[in-house]
Image (spheres, rainbow, N blue to C red):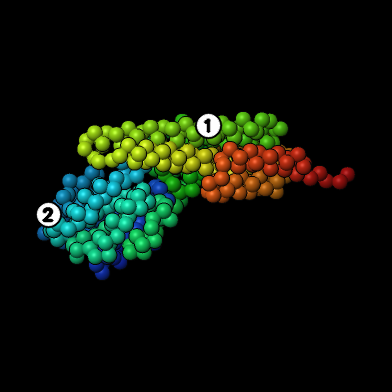
Amino acid sequence: MTVIATHQPRAQAVLDAALRSGPSHAYLFRGPRGAGKRGAARAFAAEILASAAEDAEDVRRRALLDPSPHPDLVWLVPKGAQHLVEEVRERVIRAAAYRPYEGGKRVFVIEAAEAMRDESQNALLKTLEEPPGFVHLILLSSEPAALLETIASRCQPVDFAPLPPEAVEAALHEGGGEDDEIAAAARLSAGDVELARLLLSEQGRKLRAEAEGLAAAVLGDGDAESSWRAMLKSAEEAGEGAEAATREALEAEKDAGVKRSARDLADAAKRAGRRRRTELLDLGLALAVAWFRDLAAAASGAADVAHNRDRLSQLHSQAAELDPNAARRAAELIQDTRRRLDLNVSEELALEALQFRLERTASDAVMRRPQSPK
């Protein structure tokens, strides 16, 4: 677990202590995507299995493979937007009753545990409450608040902090790319490697351009409405793509014999679409917040702390006559809109209101740096 030891000392300490004293029956690895939860879970599972095997080194080697051929390591990844209820029942709940095929332990890992429907979580509850002594469950979650409290309370939490920008950059450099853009993606992602990779994709670059376009329109008296509508359209297109992909995957499983009504299939696909649309819209607004905060930094003579490292010339140009307090106020307004969207208000109305508030801030002349009296 070298990566964890380097960047996740608290998680490393908890897991090392667990291996010394004897692991608990259930763990919840919680933290942002890309923080190392998956790799830590595989390494931890390998150590648990090795501790109860005659040939520990061979067991450890097989358990660390991805995918692992070890019969006592069961790893669940959601198919589409959610875990299938029947798969959780069959591969975890029912399988947990069977004794190990090798050695003395069985480990079940549920990746993206928040993607389990309430029905699956409630069904899993008894296994968490009264597991056989040879069973250990590891739940991974980037959104632990989406888990039922009854589930979370029965697991020992292991917290993973966001990775530092340097660690994210190192992971991104493995795929190649421009240094300045990688540095920007690492900082804008707040320690989330998967998000950083998205920002380096065509979709991510488009979102960044739309967020910057919104700021430019507000500051330059441009068409702010077309900017936020472009951002909303991108989110809607991403949602439609996610809905179609989920529907296709679920229909394929239905054809393979998985029982599911047409209504359940349609509802699951729509939920996946809504979730992806919301995620992308929130990301676009978060990028706009970061841009205005970087403008405030540049206007204050502190551009070296800006996240958008690959856009310094644009930041300096827009910040030339900008009041840093006004830029911070714009960031606060956008952040407030993000909170409003969490309350399921109309996205279009919320963005229209944001446009009005940003333009009013600009028209009140607070966007300009106060002039010194002559």
The mark total stands at 2
Q: CA distance from mark 2 to mark 1?
A: 51 Å
Give the percent coordinates (x, y) of residue 346: 56, 42
- Amino acid on which the number 1 mark rests in the picture: Lys
Q: Nearer the viewer, residue 155 or 95?
A: 95
> The residue tagged with tag 2: helix, strand or loop?
loop
Query: Residue at label 1?
Result: 233
Q: Is residue 369 visible?
A: no
Q: Nearer the viewer, mark 2 or mark 1?
A: 1
Precedes in sequence: disc 2 or disc 1: 2
Q: Residue 109's x, y, as percent?
A: 27, 52
Which residue is more in the foreground, 185 or 340?
340
Q: Are marks 2 and 1 in contact (CB under 8 Å)?
A: no
Residue beneath the point at 18% across and 53% down: 95
Which residue occupies 48% across, 45% down?
189
Q: Image check: 252 left or right of 216?
A: left
Q: Residue at x 27, y 33 (%)?
A: 252
The residue labelled by disc 2 is 101
Q: Is residue 189 left or right of residue 3?
A: right
Q: Is residue 82 left or right of residue 127?
A: right
Dot 1: element: helix
- Relative to 324, does residue 203 appear above or below in the rendering? above
Looking at numbered disc 2 in the image, what kind of residue is underneath it? Tyr
Q: Residue 16 placed where, x, y %?
A: 30, 63
| Local crowd size for mark 2, using a 10 Å CA cut-off: few (<14), some (14–19), many (≥20) | few
Where the C terminus falls, by quadrant? Answer: top right
Above/below status of 14 relative to 212:
below
